[in-house]
Amino acid sequence: MRTPHVVVVMGVAGTGKTTIGPLLAARLGVPYAEGDDFHPQANISKMSAGTPLDDEDRWPWLDAIGTWAHGRAGLGGVVSSSALKRAYRDRLRAAAPGVVFVHLTGERALIEERMRQRQGHFMPTALLDSQFATLQPLQPDEAGVAVDVSGTPEEITARAMAALDALDQ
């Protein structure tokens, strides 16, 4: 990528946003922000109890991520956010118009297996179905790329870098 974009690494829980985001940031030479850190405690408690968030829960979280992304405009950065609905991405773009999305995609079985293997995360696998039901993939008019999550983190990051580089062509 020639310009320092702010990249939002998006996807359902378990796709590897927290793994790929820092690797991508390192390759781009920009800071990384963990999207989960922007959640208020009430959201974390709700998800920990197995209750999906609703839009009212998500708006303040998205606004906080959008504020961070806006502050990185022209400087570049990578932040993770599920950004499952178009309306959520539109809200992020309203705060930070130049954001570019990297949508991590993959087979449900692979994602569920990865979720089962991770430790200490508040998102239970029981919420995966609600995440897939909510997901609205990137549309052709949205700045971003879809990247398959099969393979190693390094392979996924390399695919993401190649796809982002192609956006700048």
Image (spheres, rainbow, N blue to C red):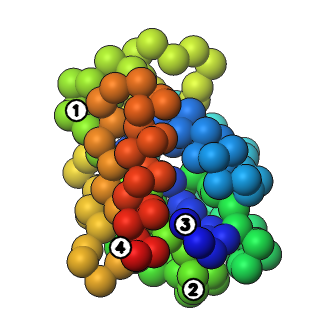
Q: Secondary structure at mark 3?
A: loop
Q: Is residue 125 left or right of residue 74?
A: left
- Choose mark 2 or mark 3, whichever is in front: 3
Q: Which residue is mark 1?
A: 108
Q: Position of residue 16 (x, y in %)?
A: 47, 35
Residue in view at x 45 percent, y 62 percent:
164
Say whether residue 27 is left or right of residue 85.
right
Q: Is residue 68 above or below residue 160?
A: below
Q: Earlier in the sequence, mark 4 or mark 3?
A: 3
What SS does tag 1 mark?
Answer: helix
Left or right: residue 164 versus residue 39 is: left
Q: Nearer the viewer, residue 28 or 44?
A: 28
For disc 2, the marked residue is 97
Disc 4 designates what residue?
A: 86
Looking at marks 1 and 2 on the same chain, the residue that comes earlier in the sequence is marked by 2
Q: Secondary structure at mark 2?
A: loop
Residue drawn at the location 20% of the way across and 34% of the way down: 107
Mark 1 or mark 3: which is in front? 3
Q: Whole-Å distance between the Cαs marked 4 and 3?
A: 24 Å
Q: Amino acid at mark 4?
A: Arg
* Kind of element beneath mark 4: helix
Residue 55 visible within the image: no
Q: Which numbered disc flags the more N-terminal residue, 2 or 3?
A: 3
Q: How dense is the environment of label 4, judged by Cα within 10 Å: few (below 14), some, or many (20 and up)?
A: some
Residue 132: x %, y % from top left: 26, 47
Q: Amino acid at mark 1?
A: Arg
The residue indicated by pointer 3 is: 1
Give the x, y percent position of residue 133: 23, 51
